[in-house]
């Protein structure tokens, strides 16, 4: 499902893990700017948006996210981390031109980003049954 991400700024390499309530993900805006947005919501955090940090593509397509006016975005990462069934961490590097698809949810003044997930394929299922949706631009 993507429990962590790694991205590079002009100054440093940053690792972000979902359990951290201060976790923010870098989002590529349409104007080319990069904005850091809060990654999902945890039980201890106030708000009205969905708990967790992920949005299933099939639930997006079925309209379950419509009430939060979802906006598709590109999350800029070098790699993402997934834990396998034994809780061992594995990092997966993205290629140039690849992004993780994100969904920005809006409710009143609250705005958070969720990682869009799809079912794992046969190769990645041994790690986890959900996988971040990788999108490409050319």
Image (tube, rainbow, N blue to C red):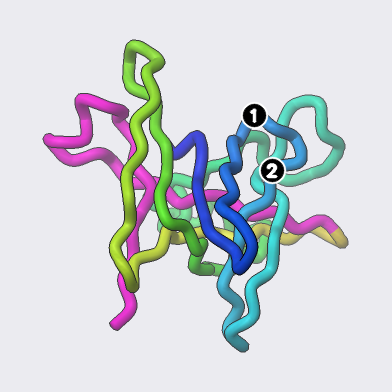
- Give me the residue at 39% from left, 32% from top: 82
Looking at the image, residue 55 sits to the left or right of residue 132; the answer is right
- Give me the residue at 72% from left, 51% from top: 38
Q: Nearer the viewer, residue 133 or 94?
A: 94
Looking at the image, residue 81 sits to the left or right of residue 39; the answer is left
Q: Residues within 10 Å of mark 2 (few under 14, many from 20)?
A: some
- Give me the residue at 21% from left, 30% from top: 125
Image spot of residue 76 (x, y percent): 50, 63
Q: Residue lying furthest front in this view? A: 11
Circle 1 SS class: loop
Residue designated by label 1: 19
Q: From what the image shows, is residue 67 above or below residue 29? A: above
Q: Nearer the viewer, residue 47 or 10?
A: 10
Separation of residues labelled 2 and 1 (CA atoms) = 8 Å
Q: From what the image shows, is residue 103 above or below residue 29? A: above
Q: How many marks?
A: 2
Q: Nearer the viewer, residue 38 or 9?
A: 9
Segment colored magenta = 110-138
Image spot of residue 30 (x, y percent): 58, 84
- Give me the residue at 52% from left, 55% from top: 7
Residue designated by label 2: 23
Residue 113 lies in magenta, yes or no?
yes
Looking at the image, residue 70 sits to the left or right of residue 132; the answer is right
Rendered image quadrant of residue 109 = bottom right
């Amino acid at each position: 499902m993507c429990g962590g991400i790694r991205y590079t700024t002009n100054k440093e390499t940053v690792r972000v893990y979902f359990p951290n309530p201060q976790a923010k993900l870098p989002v590529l805006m349409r104007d080319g700017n990069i904005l850091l947005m809060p990654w999902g919501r945890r039980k201890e955090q106030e708000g009205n948006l969905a708990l967790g940090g992920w949005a299933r593509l099939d639930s997006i397509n079925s309209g379950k996210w419509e009430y939060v006016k979802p906006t598709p975005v590109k999350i800029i990462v070098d790699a993402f981390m997934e834990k396998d069934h034994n809780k061992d961490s594995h990092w997966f590097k993205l290629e140039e031109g690849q992004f993780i698809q994100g969904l920005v949810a809006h409710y009143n003044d609250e705005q958070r980003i969720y990682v869009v997930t799809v079912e794992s394929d046969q190769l990645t299922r041994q790690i986890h049954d959900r996988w971040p949706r990788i999108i490409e631009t050319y």
